[in-house]
Amino acid sequence: MNAKIATRALKQDGNKLLGFAFATLAMAALALPAKSEDVITSHGISTFGNLALPADYTHLPYVNPEAPKGGEISIWGFGSFDSMNPYSTKGRAGGLANIGLESLLTSTADEQGASYGLLAESLEYPEDRSWVIFNMRPEARFADGSTVTAEDVVFTYETFVTKGLPSYRAVLSQQVASAEVLDTHRVKFTFHEGIPTRDLPQTVGGLPVFSKAHYEAEGLDLEESSLTPLLGSGSYELDELDVGQSITYRRRADYWGADLPMNIGRNNFDHIRVEYYADYQAAFEGFKGGSYTFRNEASSRIWATGYDFPAMDRAWINKVSLPNGDMGQAQSFNFNMRQEPFEDQRVREAIGMMFNFEWSNETLFYGLYERVNSFWENSDREATGLPSEAELALLEPLAEHLPDGVLDQEAALAPASGTRQLDRRNLRAASRLLDDAGWTVDDRGMRRNAAGELLTIEFLNDSPSFDRILNPYLENLRALGVNAEYNRVDNAQATDRERKHDYDFITYSYPMSWFPSDNLKQFFGSETAMTSVFNKSGIHSPAIDALIGHITRAQTEEELVTAVRALDRVLRAEKFWVPQWYKDSHTVAYYDMYEHPDPLPPFDLGYLDFWWFNADRAAELEAAGAFQ
């Protein structure tokens, strides 16, 4: 895993800390009938089945309700930053820049497909979910002490639908017909007719809410880079900012929601600090010296060989593997099919065959990883073997739009290789594919098309720690006759080029969910394929669009799982990615002054959320000289 993926994980941890998500969670109904037989009123909503938490729950089951408050936890960020606006394509947002924002609903770390009230104390909706009313908590306050109102919710929604990321705006505007202020603390969303509404109450309930008054007074623009954070109602706010170097957030002593059952045992650190480093190795050296205190280790080499420094010998640092019950991330190399050579599936498949995972895992990764094969790896959503009858019922009507083999072959697996770096069998197979695609070998051993153009692929990367992985891959491609080039740029250039779709081949990790819905359109849908910052490959297909429709319209979990498996099968057959690797545990190292619940919940490590600080042990470490 490279440093960009580590930074992306840092941002995801920030989102989990807040408990809101952009249209990635789903919902359904456990509720008590109210007002009429047709309207449900509840403290939360779930995709299928019942909510795990009753209306009178006192705290989340996996937290320590007696966890002490205090201390600091510090982590690292990759590269630098020049903005505190995480919702703009301009600038590079600082880590955890959305930490101060809350949403009407929030999720938990031990339950998939469920959301509970946060800014909203309850919600009302009909059985068909064609609209939803959120009853907001009147005690909710922004960090400046002003009241969080329905007007702020509507203003935030309208800002996102007019100034948010284009692909996100396109999906959201197709879903929501209107957002209305009913009174100071009641807001209603009505959805368009004729679209699946199963997930929409939670989609709009998951939107972050910021202060309209502050936004207007500061002259903010969601589309522009800014060092002024959006004003939210969350438990943390910006404390100190050293642009490009470090960010510190402080826990609000006057946080309105500290005593909510949802928040008991959470938000335990007085300060959260992010220290930035130019590369992965420099960041590790900073950790060894005590410049920051918690490290979610993403380098197998460092994990296997690097933890032999004095702080470890003195038992100042815990190095542990903790269980991870979530699905494996769909981390991969991704082709940009907007570029002409990579429109041809045979070219993509041939290039993918030259990455030798087995050799890499043994030689470079110390055997710590498993191969990713699925976009829903290590879950029951993953397509396996031949398609089931239920999958075929969805796939057969789409036959003319499907890649070869989807209907009658087992789900595509990443190509297996031998123990030598260059697998000769795969080299021969890849050669045949390129020959068939019209890329033949010239007298210098290079692949050219009929026009005499070289088959060239540029690997765009911004992390030196990835060099040892990419260089052998490039060597294998050159043995195939491909003009494989490696362009390592700084993170600002990488971000800019990715947003402009100016690349051939990049690393990306698809954040798939257990209950996917319309958010899949931003990753794989045809309508925004040429513009979406999330659709890295520009994949588009009538079959994919139709299967996303089946997923969003599924009325039972069984139907949803069938449709997800069918989509997974088609995505993998398109060969627009070269799957990388994953592990089913959290490999973490931290200075021995943090504690956590045991057992941890299955779906979130939660170190910024529900871990806590041991002040006595911290004092011992400081007295011993553990920190810089």
Image (cartoon, helix red, strand yellow):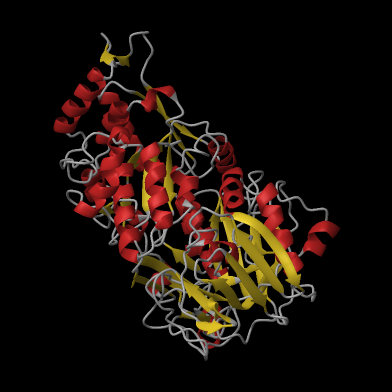
| Pick the front one: 217 or 322 | 217
Asked if residue 582 shows in the view, the reply is yes
**Residue 452: x and y, percent?**
36, 8
Residue drawn at x 71%, y 78% is: 140
Left or right of 110? Residue 200 is right
**Residue 279: x and y, percent?**
50, 49
Q: Quadrant of residue 144?
A: bottom right
Q: In which quarter of the image is residue 477?
A: top left
| Pick the front one: 377 or 12 | 377
- As drawn, the residue found furthest toward the right would be 217
**Residue 496: x and y, percent?**
59, 38
Q: Is 383 situated above or below 397? A: below
Q: Is 552 situated above or below 291? A: above
**Residue 399: x and y, percent?**
27, 37
| Pick the front one: 246 or 82 | 82
Left or right of 396? Residue 192 is right
Left or right of 468? Residue 203 is right
Q: How many labels does the image show?
A: 0
Q: Quadrant of the C terminus?
A: bottom right
Residue drawn at x 70%, y 60% is: 156
Residue drawn at x 48%, y 56% is: 196
Q: Is 173 situated above or below 616? A: above
- As drawn, the residue found furthest toward the front would be 37
Asked if residue 73 shows in the view, the reply is no
| Pick the front one: 364 or 148 | 148
